[in-house]
Image (cartoon, grey):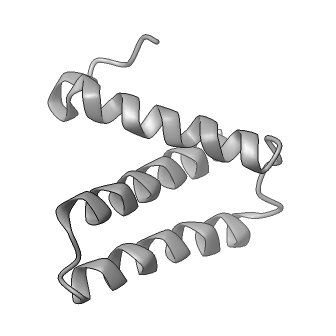
Amino acid sequence: MSYPTYVPRIGNATAELIDDEINRAKTKFKEVKFNSAHEGFAVLKEEVDELWDEVKKDGSKERMRAEAVQVAAMAIRFINELT
């Protein structure tokens, strides 16, 4: 997959993780778009809350990273659905 010029800043491996998560979510939810910006925000907030839960319990780096990837994926999905 080709990525915009900002990818080298985050790294191709990270971009691939985020892209994989976006595709996983699309498959799981059958590519249904958010019903509204409010729903998109709620989904994004839920992912942020899950990341925060891992941070508060001093979770493993792997678990925090997985949650952060989900946050990034949902943020990108939200952005894409606004365009």
Answer with left or right where residue 51 lies relative to residue 65: right
Q: Going 71% across and 41% down the picture, which residue do you hit? A: 26
Q: Pinpoint residue 81: horizontal percent, then vertical percent.
A: 68, 44
Q: Going 83% across and 43% down the picture, which residue do you hit? A: 30
Q: Quadrant of the C terminus?
A: top right
The answer to whether 1 is drawn above or below residue 83 in the figure is above
Q: Pinpoint residue 14: horizontal percent, then vertical percent.
A: 28, 35
Q: Going 38% across and 51% down the picture, which residue do you hit? A: 69
43 or 29, which is in the foreground? 29
Answer with left or right where residue 8 lies relative to residue 4: left
83 or 39, which is in the foreground? 39
Q: Pinpoint residue 72: horizontal percent, then vertical percent.
A: 41, 51
The part of the image, by quadrant, that contains residue 51 is bottom left
The answer to whether 66 is drawn above or below residue 54 in the figure is above
Q: How many numbered callouts?
A: 0
82 or 35, which is in the foreground? 35
- Considering every residue shown, the one lying at the far top of the view is 2
Answer with left or right where residue 14 lies relative to residue 71: left
Q: Pinpoint residue 7: horizontal percent, then vertical percent.
A: 27, 25
Answer with left or right where residue 8 lies relative to residue 64: left
46 or 53, which is in the foreground? 53
The answer to whether 17 is drawn above or below residue 73 in the figure is above
The answer to whether 78 is drawn above or below residue 54 in the figure is above
Q: Going 24% across and 88% down the picture, which residue do you hit? A: 57
